[in-house]
Image (tube, rainbow, N blue to C red):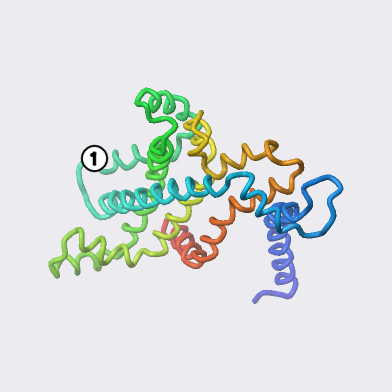
Amino acid sequence: MTSRFERITTYALLIAASAFALYPMGLILFSALQPDSVGGTGAFHFDNFQTAWRVGHFGRYMANSILVAVVVVVVSAILSSLAGYAFGTMKFRGSSALFYLLLLGLMVPSEAIVIPLYYDLRGMGLTDTYVALILPQIAQSLAFGVFWMRQYFRSVPSEIVEAARMDGAGHGRVLWSILLPMGRPAIITMVLLVLMWTWNEFLLPLVMLPTNEGLRTAPLGLSFFKGQYTEGTSLLAAGAVLVALPIVVFYIFAQRHFIRGMLEGSVKG
C-alpha cells in the first residue's frame, strides 16, 4: 500500500518534471505575445501571429511542409506495412539478413549522408525539387517503420492468421481486412512519429534547396525569418508557435492511440 509520503513525493516529482518540460514552451508563447518593437506597450499582442504569418510567408512554407509530410507519411506507412507484414508473418530465405541490413538505416545519421546525397541528386538534376525533399525522408522513415510494424505483426496471435487462412483469406485480405484494423494504435504511433520527424526536418531542406526559395519548408522558412524581418524576438516566437501548431493539434487528437501504441510497443518489444 502506498504511504502518504510516497504519494506526496510522486506528485512533487511529476509536477517538477511537468514544469521542466513545459517551461520552454510557455516562455516561447509568452514571448510571442509581447510587443516586437523596443518601447512597445500592451500585455498581449495577438496580432504578432498575423504579422508573422504575412511577413514571413508562412502560408506558402506551411503548404510545402504539408505536401512533403503527407506524401512521406502515406508512402512510408504503406511500404512499412507491406514490408513489416512480410518480415513478421512469413519465413523466406535471407529474411533475417535483409531485416538487419534494413536496420542500418536507424544507425546512420543524416549528417553522414546528406553531402554525398546532395551530389547524387544534383547529378540527376533533382535538387531544388520536391523529389529531393521527399525521397530521402521516405528512405529514412522506412527503417523505423518496418521495424515497428514487424514487431506489431509478430505480436499478433498466430491463431488469428491461421483461422483467416482456413476461411480462404489470402495475404492481401489478412493484411488489409484483419491485421491493419486491429493494429490502429501501432499504425497511429508510427504515423505520428514519422510526421513529427518529417515536419521538423531542417538539414535536408537546407542542403537540397540551395536556390529555390519557393519550396522552403516551414522550419527552414523560420530560420530565414530570424533577423531578416524581425526587430526583436516576439515575431520570431510567434512564427515558431505557428510552425509547431499543426503537430501539437494532431498530437492532441491522436494522443490516446499514440500512448497506447507506445505502451504496447514497450511491453511487447
Secondary-structure class at tag 1: loop
Q: Residue at x 13, y 67 (%)?
A: 168
In this rendering, position of residue 17 left or right of residue 179: right
Residue 198 visible in rendering: no
In this rendering, position of residue 258 left or right of residue 40: left
Residue 10 visible in rendering: yes
In this rendering, position of residue 228 left or right of residue 161: right
Q: Give how far across and how far down residue 109 sits, in percent.
A: 49, 35
Q: Residue at x 69, y 57 (%)?
A: 22
Q: Give how far across and how far down residue 174 sits, in percent.
A: 22, 63
Q: Residues within 10 Å of mark 1 (few under 14, many from 20)?
A: few
Which residue reaches farthest right?
Answer: 39
* Of the pair 50 and 153, the residue shown nearer to us: 50
* Residue position for label 1: 94
Q: Quadrant of residue 175?
A: bottom left
Whether residue 24 is situated above or below residue 14 in the rendered picture: above
* Of the pair 139 and 223, the residue shown nearer to us: 223
* Of the pair 121 and 212, the residue shown nearer to us: 212
Q: Residue at x 77, y 60 (%)?
A: 44
Q: Give how far across and how far down residue 15 sits, in percent.
A: 72, 64
Q: Give how far across and how far down residue 20 sits, in percent.
A: 71, 55
